[in-house]
Amino acid sequence: MPSTYSEFGKSLEDIMPVPPVDPHLERLKDFIDTEWGLPAVENQLRGLFMGGLPPISPPQRWAISRNINVVELIWEQTQSEKFIEEMWPCIKILIGVDTCNTMWAAQTLTVLAMFNIIRLLPIISGQ
């Protein structure tokens, strides 16, 4: 029992290891916060739906109210630090060894945000 009581006086930081900070994640957060603006999201979405056959129809054809600004919703999602942190493991899988490519990571985050917003559209649009 003495070992249990000896741990009692320690702070949580002394007992639980602090996970290392991922420099690529921190760099992505900074990039999203300072350089990945609404125009970047709009340009990326335009590129996804132009030429070729996209996997889904463009937002202009979606059966939602015209008052819903999909681009802005996606951009706001990418600005959420919690969303970035939740998606980081997925981004690391999707871009593999290229996690140091911040632009690609931001573009991947944007696509993930788009699909997350699509999941919320029935709620947002009241359908």
Image (cartoon, helix red, strand yellow):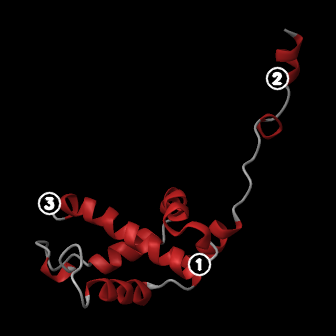
At label 2, counting other C-alpha atoms closer than 10 Å, the crowd grade (few under 14, some 14-19, many 20 or more) is: few
Going 18% across and 60% down the picture, which residue do you hit? 122
Position in image of residue 44 (x %, y %) = 38, 85
Q: Earlier in the sequence, mark 1 or mark 3?
A: 1
Asked if residue 91 lies left or right of residue 27, the reply is left
Q: Is disc 3 in contact with disc 2, using a CB cutoff of under 8 Å?
A: no
Q: Is disc 2 in contact with disc 1, using a CB cutoff of under 8 Å?
A: no
Q: Which label was assigned to residue 13?
A: none
What residue did someone put label 3 on? 126
Nearer the observer: mark 1 or 3; the answer is 1
Task: Name the residue type under label 3.
Answer: Gly
Going 53% across and 74% down the picture, which residue do you hit? 105
What residue did someone put label 2 on? 8
What residue did someone put label 1 on? 102
In space, the residues marked 1 and 3 are separated at their CA atoms by 36 Å
Q: Earlier in the sequence, mark 3 or mark 2?
A: 2
Q: Earlier in the sequence, mark 2 or mark 1?
A: 2
Give the secondary structure at mark 2: helix
Going 26% across and 84% down the picture, which residue do you hit? 49
Report the front residue among 94 and 18.
94
Give the secondary structure at mark 3: loop
Asked if residue 83 lies left or right of residue 47, the reply is right
Going 82% across and 16% down the picture, which residue do you hit? 4
In space, the residues marked 3 and 2 are separated at their CA atoms by 51 Å
